[in-house]
Amino acid sequence: MIWPLELIIFLIMIPTALLALWLRDLLGTIAVLAAYSLFVALLFAGMAAPDVALVEVVIGAGVTGLLLVGAVLLTGRRDTSVEGGRSRWLPGLLVAGFLGLMLVGSVDLPDYADPEAPGHQRISPDYIEGSLEDTETPNVVTSVLADYRSFDTLGETLVIVTAGLACLVILLREAH
Amino acid sequence: MAELLFDRTVYVGVMVLLAIGLYGMLAKRNLVKKLVGMVIFQTAIYLFFIQGAAQMGATVPVIEEELGTAADTYVNPLPHLLILTALVVGVGVLGVALSFLLRIYRRHGTFDEDEIAAQLAAEPIEGHRVDDHGADHGADHDAADPEEPRS
């Protein structure tokens, strides 16, 4: 954890996210979104989560970008919507309220990187201490993913199959 | 001192990203932009979990011989796993949403929410499937018929 680096990445990410929503060219939006995903991956790597960083680069920046580019190339590239009137201030007001509530709620959360945080106390130490003996896998994330909690992973696979089938049903029904 | 400040700043950053994503979903009129807002919102949630896994003085959760297996040497691996799952599921959600968008575009020819609403208001909504370009695809329709029983 190198906090100045993480602070700088946060300061880059917020304008990047705003730019992705602001651009009128949808391909530009997708490019900026991919860059945003790369910054998030950097942040994950900085927070000692290399597995998540790799998956974020491949899936967040790669697959998401490819899917969006494919969809936009098949349809329209320009965002021609007109914004104004009620649509401008009402969501802004709602989002400001949401942000305020979330910030008030975050006051009770444990400090960043606090080793005494409740989340680190119960089951996670068992995973770390047992990983080498139980599964002979030094990478604890792998051993939890594929061994301790492999039913979670099975469920995830089912979700992906369902999503793929849903895409097929939605797209093919139209063909006739 | 500055490090102490960052203890809370990381929450502010995550919440601001959440708010940006929510704003994109609520305020943007273009449906692809709404999806982009959703991706930003999801990413902020991933970030919230991953920052919760971090521990001062702890390293990547891969067991090293010389470091031993003491739990406070390594960051919490559980949120990493949850987010790996969520990342993959997020792409599934995006795929289904994009296939809906493709259908909406083929039907209405636009991603603009207001225009779609206007089109829907202009034409009466019928109980059965409205085939407004049936005339163009009449030949396709007949060709497709032998492959399957008439629905």
Image: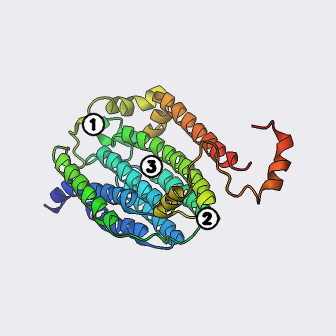
| Number of numbered discs overlaid on the protein picture | 3
Pointer 2 and pointer 3: residues touching (CB < 8 Å)?
A: no
Q: Is residue B48 visible?
A: yes
Q: Position of residue B118 (x, y in %)?
A: 49, 61
**Residues behind callouts 1 and 2 on a single chain:** yes
Mark 1–mark 3 distance (CA, rounded to whole Å): 18 Å
Amino acid residing under circle 3: Val
Q: Position of residue A103 (x, y in %)?
A: 20, 52
**Residue beneath label 2, please?**
A75
The mark nearer the N terminus, 1 or 3, is 3
Amino acid residing under circle 1: Gly
Q: Give the structural element (helix, strand or loop) at label 3.
A: helix
Q: Residue at x 64, y 50 (%)?
A: B130
Front-lying residue, A147 or B105: B105
Mark 2–mark 3 distance (CA, rounded to whole Å): 32 Å
The numbered disc on residue A119 is 1
**A111 over A11 or under it: above or below:** above
* Among the 4 quarters of the image, the one containing residue A161: top right
Q: Quadrant of the N terminus of chain A?
A: bottom left
Label 3 crowding class (10 Å Cα cut-off): few <14, some 14-19, many 20+?
Answer: many
Mark 1–mark 2 distance (CA, rounded to whole Å): 45 Å
Q: Residue at x 69, y 47 (%)?
A: A172
Q: Dot 2 falls on which chain?
A: A
Pointer 1 and pointer 3: residues touching (CB < 8 Å)?
A: no
**B43 over A142 or under it: above or below:** below
Q: Dot 3 falls on which chain?
A: A
Q: Is residue B63 visible?
A: no
Amino acid residing under circle 2: Thr
Q: Position of residue A157 (x, y in %)?
A: 56, 36
**A167 over B132 or under it: above or below:** above
Q: Position of residue B95 (x, y in %)?
A: 56, 50
In the rendered view, does A168 fall on the left or right side of B86? right
